[in-house]
Amino acid sequence: MAHMDGQISNELDASQAEPADKPRKARSLAPLRMVYREAAKYPRQIGLALLALTITAAATLAIPWRFKVIIDEAFGGTAGVEEIGHAFQYLLMIVVILGFGTALRYYFVSWIGERVVADIRLRVQRNLLRLSPGFYEENSPKEISSRMTSDTAIIETVVGSTVSIALRNILTGIGGIIVLLYLAPNLTLGLLIGIPLILAPIIYFGRKIRAISRTSQDRVADVGAYVSEVLSAMKIVQSFGQQERESERFGGVVERTFETARKRIVLRAMMTSIVIVLVFGGITMVMWRGAIAVSEGLISGGTIAAFVLTGGLVAGAFGALTEVYGDLLRGAGAASRLAELLEAKPDIAAPERPEQLPEPPRGSLSFRNVTFRYPARPETPALKDFTLEIEPGETVAIVGPSGAGKSTIFQLVERFYDPQLGTIRLDGVPLTKADPADLRQRLAFVPQDGVLFSANARDNLRYGKWDAGDEDIWEAARAANAESFLQELPDGLDTYLGEGGTQLSGGQQQRVAIARALLRDAPILLLDEATSALDAESEQLVQRALEALMQDRTTLVIAHRLATVRKADRIIVLDGGEIAEQGTHAELSAAGGLYSRLAALQFAATEAA
């Protein structure tokens, strides 16, 4: 009875165990084939787990049988002291076997679950690293992160627990029915008729509770999202004095969460009441009939005791299978979402027979009639019929108002996207015919905001040239005016820089990013306003380092501050994805066009400041 009551509790608890970011509901268990294929790589562990499952199921059913022997012989007064001792020794032996088998089952099943999840995560991450940035425009990285955490957690539960529970209860249920039929066929038939009556409300209420649990977890997710949003913008909240309003908003979110939870609690209470009445009522009826049979001498007291215990095990086993099916469906939904990430194909991939880039590299770039639209904004062209020839060693600055298409040029050069029309060539080779990995080996990029990783300073600096030695790393740091603050770090190059480089200031992060590009020593340099985060003194020092670096290299510079591009060989002025003007600083300033107006505004603002 205690086992059955615990089973009911487990069913109720499991019904609300949906993750906050729930997987898409699966209609079948077919997506779990992917999980099975991963698990099948470990046949030895699977075999040992199945052996342990069989041993524990057999030991579980043997316990009621031993109780029958003990009650009939030990308590019936027909056995001597030695026989009683043997009876209890056998029972203890069964308990030891059950404990040992359970430990083995738990270890191997849990090992398989963790190993399968680890393998799936590795495969998914490996595929994600192959996908182009366009994929992440249409698929939120936060949602992908959720799949890698909450969905894989569900898979781990399914493989490391649910499947084990299912197999154990199937073995227990089938074996238990065989034992019951042997003990008391007539009582067994009555029990088999009663089991569906108990399972019906569990299934009915379980589905309703599971549905409302998904809603409840969504409300809980709303709470988390709200808290994250407000706390990340706390300076704005306090600056505008909106603490009271945000408190009221949070109260509304919390109340909606509570109301949904209350509905779930009502359903759980109803289910608990009905199931307990049916379970214990059914057990009472069986014992009633059994007591009559004992009084009439049809069965022994030990038989009825073993029957009740085994019946409880059988009922619990079938009750657990309803829970298991729901968990398997959730696992199938999670598996289907992970399979989508595994099956996603990169838009940008190397051709079957890539054309080799010429050696040594020259550094020429050619854009011919290029038109490009971002996948997330197909109605608006970022570049329109764009044509530009860049000679080896030339420094070309790209300027223009926000949204003119400056960053798009960099994204196309690095082949994060392919244009819908036109051709881009590097050293005469169309980018679509080259291996993207070979192409990117010839590029060094410094973003507008220094992007660092949760690693030490050495690994961040050598990210573009992993085999670089410390001497080369310090030389690059010195050229980027980063040597002094790197030397002052507690552990030098071995200092952990924190998540996103939070141990450094914005200007220091940017100088590390510049040093990283210097160390790469690529023939083409892409600078996206690389000195924007530096103070005036550091900017001058780094600018001199960049000027030395740009010697004998092809350099593209995106400039928002026009003072940084006066020495460029050529300045390209973009407007609406098209070239509005091009020339030197002197030529464009004298032309009186868009560049002249932008320069006049910026230099006037600088003088006024």
Image: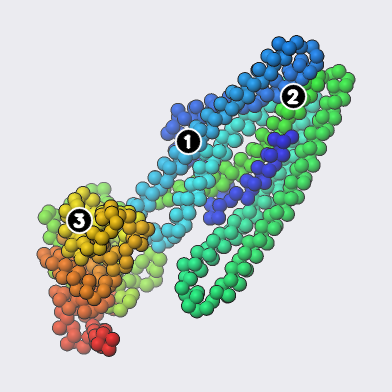
Determine the image quadrant of residue 287. top right
What residue is disc 3 on? 473
Q: Tell me if I can see residue 473 in this picture.
A: yes
Q: Amino acid at mark 3?
A: Ile
Between residues 57 and 182, which one lies in front from this camera angle?
57
Q: Position of residue 536 (x, y in %)?
A: 24, 76
Give percent across and percent down for residue 201: 73, 44
Residue lying at 45% horizontally and 54% vertically, measured from the top left = 145
Q: Which residue is mark 1?
A: 111
Numbered tag placed on residue 56 in the rendering = none
- 343 on left or right of 416: right
Give the Cα separation between the discs numbered 3 and 2. Answer: 76 Å
When asked about the image quadrant of residue 85, the answer is top right
The quadrant in which the N terminus is found is top right
Q: Give the residue type that dot 2 points to.
A: Ala
Label 3: state its secondary structure.
helix
Q: Could you say where residue 76 lies in the image, as x and y percent from the top left?
A: 80, 16
Name the secondary structure under disc 1: helix
Give SS at disc 2. helix
Q: Residue at x 36, y 48 (%)?
A: 126
Residue occupying image coordinates x 79% and y 37%: 280
Residue 533 x/y as whole percent: 29, 71
Q: Is residue 442 visible?
A: no
- Residue 306 marker: 2
